[in-house]
Image: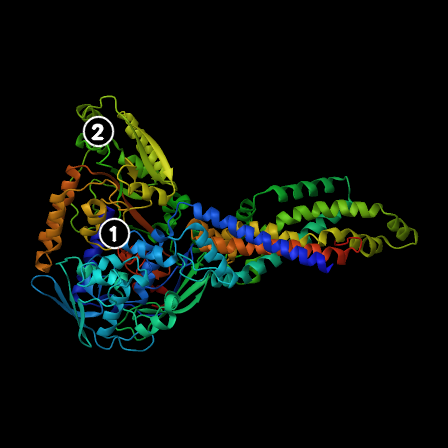
Amino acid sequence: MKKTVLAGVAALLAATALTSASALADDIKQGGSMIVTYKDDVSTLDPAIGYDWQNWSMIKSLFDGLMDYEPGTTNLMKDLAEDYTISDDGTVFTFKLREGVKFHNGREMTAEDVKYSLDRVTNPATQSPGAGFFGSIKGYDAVAAGDATSLEGVTVVDPYTVKIELSRPDATFLHVMAINFSSIVPKEAVEEWGADFGKHPVGTGAFSLDEWTLGQRLVFKRNEDYWRAGVPKLDEITFEVGQEPVVALLRLQRGEADIPGDGIPPAKFLEVTKDPQYKDLIIEGGQLHTGYVTMNVKMPPFDKLEVRKAVNMAINKDRVVRIINGRAVPANQPLPPSMPGYDDEYTGYPYDPEAAKALLAEAGFPDGFETELYVYNTDPNPRIAQSIQADLAAIGIKADIKALAQANVIAAGGEPDQAPMIWSGGMAWIADFPDPSNFYGPILGCAGAVKGGWNWSWYCNEELDKQATAADSMTDPAQKAEREEAWRKIFISVMDDAAWAPVFHEQRFTMRSERLGGPDAIFVDPVHIPVNYDYVWAKDVQ
Amino acid sequence: MGGYILRRVVQSVLILIGITFLTFVLLYLIPADPARQIAGRSATAQTVENIREQLGLNLPFYQQYFRYLTGLLQGDLGRSYLQKTEVGALIWSRLPATLLLMVGAIVCELVIGLTMGLVAALRRNTATDTSLMVLSFVGVSSPQFVIGILLLYVFSVQLGWFPIGGYGTFMHMVLPSLTLGFLGAGWYSRMMRSSMIDVLRQDFIRTARAKGLKRWQVLFGHALPNALLPIVAMIGIDIGLFMSGIVVVESVFGWPGIGQLAWQAIQRVDIPIIMGVTLVSAFAIVAGNFLADLIAPLIDPRIKLR
């Protein structure tokens, strides 16, 4: 139900965006301010470094990339690129830049800045956690190895044109140009501040950083010269940090804050969501997330397909969802529902302990077996693991729970012979960009089934890898549907092999104060996580 | 006297070096790989290796420790892995808030503790005395997060007298200072009570009474100054108590001091910050004790330093 409502909002947004790029912008007056609260201090606002869900959307408000997404949706749109062309073989992208776009320091942004920004993010000295996303650009390997400081494939054609050559066709490349790591930064500001650029960010974004008092607050001010007319709506955003989620909620209820950035705290969730007073202020949205149980196909008895299928049929997913107060929807496949390529018709393995038992007997384990279930030791993950443990016990599998620190679970998953089963909660996997390929390579492909990798099932199907490469070579936008279909087939094949037992997709719940306006979708934006700040408006200035 | 101070300074430095070694060993043994933490989940093995090399994390333990100590001697506390800032700058920016909170707490514990102790001593063995001492017992034994949350709930949420956490005005300061000072107030009331009872038994009090002084003159002119002596010397030691309390109190009230910094760093295993805050707190405790020892003979000439 909620899903359809959301899809409707998304479609509506897409439609308005089509008829008039600024339909949203025209009727809403700019002005006003809001207060967003967070528990932790913001780590960095350097787009090459920032990689947590707290600074993700802040960086998007301060910086722009060549591409972005329509507000509240996963549909790509042009941002600093006024237009682009893709060569027929899908390896040359030529971007025409918008003219007259100014950095917060007043200088005009040009093609040189695009080249500089890409060289910087891929340079090992920058220590960017996102450097790997640029692997398809020609010359990436030389830069990553430290043999070059400039990407061979990126050339400045004229001040407003930049050409990017790839070493292989990459259908996800426009998404790569939309992630924070490819934001355009001005060289002079980066060099002035050095490692502290993240505390003194200068971009072309809708807001600029006005004040940052460590441990207390950050203030964003509207960029008066922003190139997109009518954006952003607010004059000022204050981020107050150091506030526990429960306190943040109380302050919101008393009208002292507008958005609790960390969401509704689990302890208060039922109380708040059941209160009719807040019904219209709570917004639910999908997340590009899947929680799953991996089964290491290299460790017997999980090398047997029947055993993996039996586990899939043994887990009572509805009960797991109840354990977390319904903050998720049950999953039947690796892809989350809001991801292109999700198969609406696929129903997955049914919950059927009897059939599961029969499968175990068929595999030669009529009395079950003993194994281990690794889990990250923070709530609610151990409770979820206990529920799964009980389900497995019902079909005769005695799973010992190993609750460890996050780093230890990740390390165990990265060894070929250590963790037979892992519950992924709190560790993996939320998509970096809304494209199905991001849910395959690192966690289900052969490339991830290496020591220290994230493919904890150690599932490596070369035939599927070939199909994945083929799908990612379909760079022609006209092939979009065909490509989605290819991915859909790949993920259903993964389920036929039962490499995972998908359990649920987490939903996000945000609350906003009465005085904030804007479409619900931007408060649970799938890409500008957690909130698309640029499009929130204040009711008191209308 | 000079010899004593020199000896104590040397001792203090040795203690601090010992603390750096212990914390470094403990944090070195934690199975969290900082390079992987910085690199994030999308990083290639090559990126992780690069970072490890740039940070010197592939060096043997003693070399890493030596690097840390060398930096420390130059006033460099290192750079936070997750906050991406100099640890020194982070601590420095949060120090004023913590000091302010401590001043508030000292005022609270003295005013509450001494008053309670004084009243209890004067009403010795009455119902007032007993209930005050029960209250002080509660103060000493209650966990600070319980008191903090209770005060927050009653006075901010229900009554709305104070803001719900935060920093900035005098009103913001009241509840956290009370919470932090309540523990000390418990101690002080007990010390004040017994110290006052002792003093009131002394001969000079009887003499003062005998020469015809009024009751309040005896109490505030003669008894109180003498009863306070052993207590004032305790304030230095309090700083140590506060250092353990601020982590909890600052987190409950959203107070932007170094306690909150430590709590956030511990949750995310940000080792340089944990090291930095531990060192600064250790320094404060050592310095506090040292000062208390130095002040004692100034207040009470009977105490001699050797």
Earlier in the chain: of badge 2 and badge 1, it is 2
Q: Residues within 10 Å of mark 2 (few under 14, many from 20)?
A: some
Name the element at disc 2.
loop
Please name the residue that numbered disc 1 is placed on: A431
- Above or below, comparing residue A276 to residue A420 in the picture: below
Lateral position of residue B172 relative to residue B303, left or right = left
Q: Position of residue A294 (x, y in %)?
A: 25, 39
Residue at mark 2 to residue at mark 1: CA–CA distance? 30 Å
Lateral position of residue A14 relative to residue B246, left or right = left
Q: Position of residue B226 (x, y in %)?
A: 79, 53
Q: Residues within 10 Å of mark 1 (few under 14, many from 20)?
A: many
**Is residue A32 visible in the rendered structure shown here?**
no
Asked which quadrant contains residue A177, the reply is bottom left
Lateral position of residue A32 relative to residue A226, left or right = right
Q: Residue furthest right?
A: B211
- The type of residue carrying mark 1 is Ala
Q: Position of residue A392 (x, y in %)?
A: 28, 29
Asked which quadrant contains residue B239, the reply is bottom right
- Above or below, comparing residue A477 to residue A225 in the picture: above
Residue at coordinates 36% horizontally, 56% vertically from top-left? Answer: A512
Question: In the image, are marks 2 and 1 on the same chain?
Answer: yes
| Residue closest to the eye, B237 or A505 | B237
